[in-house]
Structures are given as C-alpha cells and as structure tokens.
Amino acid sequence: MCRVLIALGSMLLATGCGSGNQAPETGSAGIPLSISGNQTTTALGDQSIAKKTLSQYPDAVRQLLQKANSAVVAGQKGVAVEALSQAIAESPEDASLFRMRADVYCLQGENANARVDFSTAVRLAPNNADSYNYRGYFLMSQGLSKEAIADFEKAIQLNPAHAAALNNRGLIALTNQDYKSAEADFTKAIDGDRKFADAWNNRGFARLKLEQYEPALADLQQALRLQETYVTAWNNCGLVHMQQEKYEAALQAFSRASELEPMDMRWLGHRRAALLKLNRFAEAQQDGAKLAWLEQLNQLTQQASRNARNPAAWIFRGKHLMNGSQYGAAIQDFTRALIVNPGNTEALTGRASAWMATGDLQKAMLDCDESIVAQSSQEAYSIRGDLWMRLENFDNAISDFETAGRFDEQVAVAYEKRADDRRGAGQADEAKTDLQRAQEIRNAMVDTENKAKPPQSAAGFDPASSAGAIQN
C-alpha cells in the first residue's frame, strides 16, 4: 500500500492513498493477490491472466495449487514456493503461476526472486495489461517509481480503462505532489470502475490537497458507501472537516477510524487534535496517554524484532500489552517467549493471566500448574488462587493465597465465601473463624493504608495544590 504523509499545521499526519493492489493478510486468505477486488480474482490468483478457473487446471496442477494455498494460510511460505515451483514445472507457459509464486516471494522478502517471476509473467503474457500492472505495483512498493510508471503506462496502453493501473499511476503522482495529474488518473480509474473504493478515496485525498473540500468530502463519502469500514477514508473525512473547522464532525470521523484500527497512532493523534480544538481536554489527555502507550509498544516491538531469540524481549512486550488490555496479542508474545525458552516461569504466569482475562480458565490453570512445577513462585500461586476463586473452590483459593503470602480484599472475600459454605454445611465454628480471619485482613489493610498516608501540616497546607496554583 502506498502511504502519503502530509502535515496540517504541526499536528496532523494523514495517510491519504488507498492501494489498488492491497494483498490480504496471511492467515485470513490464500495466496495474496497483487490487485484488489476491482478485478475478478480467486484465493489462488487472478483468473484474467490464465483465462481459466481452478477447476480447469490439470489435476496435478490443481492439487499443487491447493497445497500452496493451504501452506500460505498456515504461514508455511517455503512449502508454498515449492508447490508452486512444481506446478510451474507441469505448466511452464502459464503466466499466472509465476505471478502467484512472485506474491509468495514477496511475503518471504525474497524481492529479487519476486521481480524475476513478475518479469517472467510479463514475458509469457506480453499483451495482458494485468501482467504489467502487477509488476508495476511491485516495483512501486520497492520505491522504483520510474520503472513502475513505465509498467502502468504499458498496462494503460493495452487497456485504457484499466482502473487499477490508472489508480496506481495516480498514487505515484500523489507522492510527487502532482495533485492535478493524480486527480485526473483517479477520475479515469473511477470511470473504469465506479465501485473502486480506493480510487474514490484517493481522488478525495488529491482534492483535499487541492483545497477542493466539498468535492473531496463527496468522494470520500462515496468511498465509505462502497466500503463502510474503509479506515483511511474515515481519516481523510476527518482531515477535510478539520480544514473546514468542523471539529465535531472531524472528531466523529477520527473516532470511527480509531474504532476500526485502535492500535494505529495516526488516527488517535488526529482525534486528540480534534478534541483539543473542542476544548475537551480530559478526553484529549486520555488519548495522549494511549499515544504514549502505543509509542512504547512500538519501541518494544522493535526491540523484540532485533532480539527475537531472547524470551525477555517478548515477555516485556507481552506485559505491556496486558497493561493495555490487549490480551490476545499478549498471549501470542508469551507464547513466542515459551517457544524460544520452554518452561519459562515468567512467560507461563504472564500467559496464565492473559488466559484468565479472556475467560479461558482451563488454559490459565494449566499454565499456572506448569509454572509451579518448573519453579514455585508467589505470582503463580497468586494467579492460581484467583482462578480457584472464579471456579468457586474457596479451600484451594485460600491455600494458594496463603502460599503466595497474599492478604488483600480478594483473600478476605475468599474467607467470607468459605464461611458461607461452612455455615450451610452446619460448621458454625469454622465459619466464625473464617469471618474473623476476613475481618483481621481488612483491619490490617486499613492500618497499612493509614501508615502510608503523608502527614498534613497544622494549617492543612497541600504542596501539590499550591504548586498548581502558581503555574502560568
């Protein structure tokens, strides 16, 4: 995807362009496509090159394509390349097979091999506009704009109504800040495909840069009618509203973008800017805190990428994700730590906490048990005590809390709950003992709180409020 960054004042960064060639995420689809839904495609590639559906391939090739597709979904890119290579050996003149293998090479970061395969597809299908557009998009993604433009123009020469190639040529014009040419290309792309949401969004962005705010907004709204979850279009609507000083409308647009992609700092930063314009400072402060959390997450992500064999890097990132209530992502990071260091007790207890937060008590219990077997720790017993509480096994909960040396409100509640059970079982004395223990814990908590409170001066002077009063 091409991303164009702009600044509005000193506060706004915009992602304006939408790619006509956006590939699906690995794991949610099969072999990713070099072109978006404005062309007829399947999970195994573009039908418009080979002029055949999957069922029309020879049996041997079809089976290999199915194997490759399953391998990509499973993240086994090497297996997919091998299967596609075998398919190519069976049908060496089929351009679409080379294009599919090029896509997998892209996923692997094998860009030299990808370029060779895209070029082979062009050689085998020299009169097919899609072949040039596919390679052009790859070249554009590598920053080779001049070569990419040549491919897009060849595609347009072969098919003047080729919407994706027109859109992609417009993206290059955007990066060159040639907004008039970009607008013209996006208009032609829209004429070629009225349902091409990317082109509507991109023309809206170009018109925003040309200060044509109402036409820009109309384009962006059309993109959203075609694809309501188009996050970039929501963001760009917000940017238009900000330029028009319609801050409430901008806030709504940025909020929708943040709702769709809550982990993206750009939309959140824009929303904070709108909140500041509306003098809603408390909410802006909350967004600022989340931005700081996301910035730290980015730093931890970079550290983990550089030290992927170090379990501590994944554990630190997992704990940070837990602090942001991103429990599913935290589970993945703790699992990564355990892959490189099986039995790591810190990773096991961290993952147990995450499983518990998601409601999967069985997996959380298994991780706690494994952690305690590997190396007994207060944290593992404490978490397991919480799990027993959720399962209403108060005997085991109290036992684990005591082993963990933990005495807080949760422990007091455990004693009270067990007292209720014992009273119901006719064990009045044991119930009374449990209630006394719960009260002792609460009394101790109050004493600790009082000791922790700072003493006040005779006049009740509050340093914090005094310091705040004299600030400019």
Image (cartoon, grey):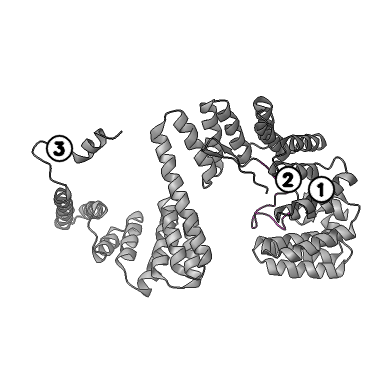
The reply, left or right, for residue 276 in relation to residue 193 is left
Q: Are marks 2 and 1 in contact (CB under 8 Å)?
A: yes
Helix or strand or loop: what does disc 1 sit on? helix
Q: Main secondary structure of the magenta part?
A: loop
Checking the image for residue 461, the label placed there is 3
Q: Nearer the viewer, residue 202 or 58?
A: 202
Checking the image for residue 152, the label placed there is 1
Which residue is drawn at the image coordinates 39% and 64% (left, top)? 349
* Residue 113 drawn in magenta: no
Q: Is residue 327 above or below residue 112?
A: above
Helix or strand or loop: what does disc 3 sit on? loop
Number of numbered discs present?
3
Q: Is residue 102 above or below residue 214?
A: below
Amino acid on which disc 2 is placed: Ile
Instruction: Tell me how far mark 1 sits from mark 3, CA to CA.
Output: 72 Å
Which residue is drawn at the image coordinates 79% and 55% (left, top)? 135
Which residue is drawn at the image coordinates 26% and 61% (left, top)? 401
Task: Identify the image quadrant of residue 460.
Answer: top left
Q: Residue furthest left?
A: 458
Decide which of tag 1 and tag 3 comes sooner along the chain.
1
| Residue, disc 2 | 172
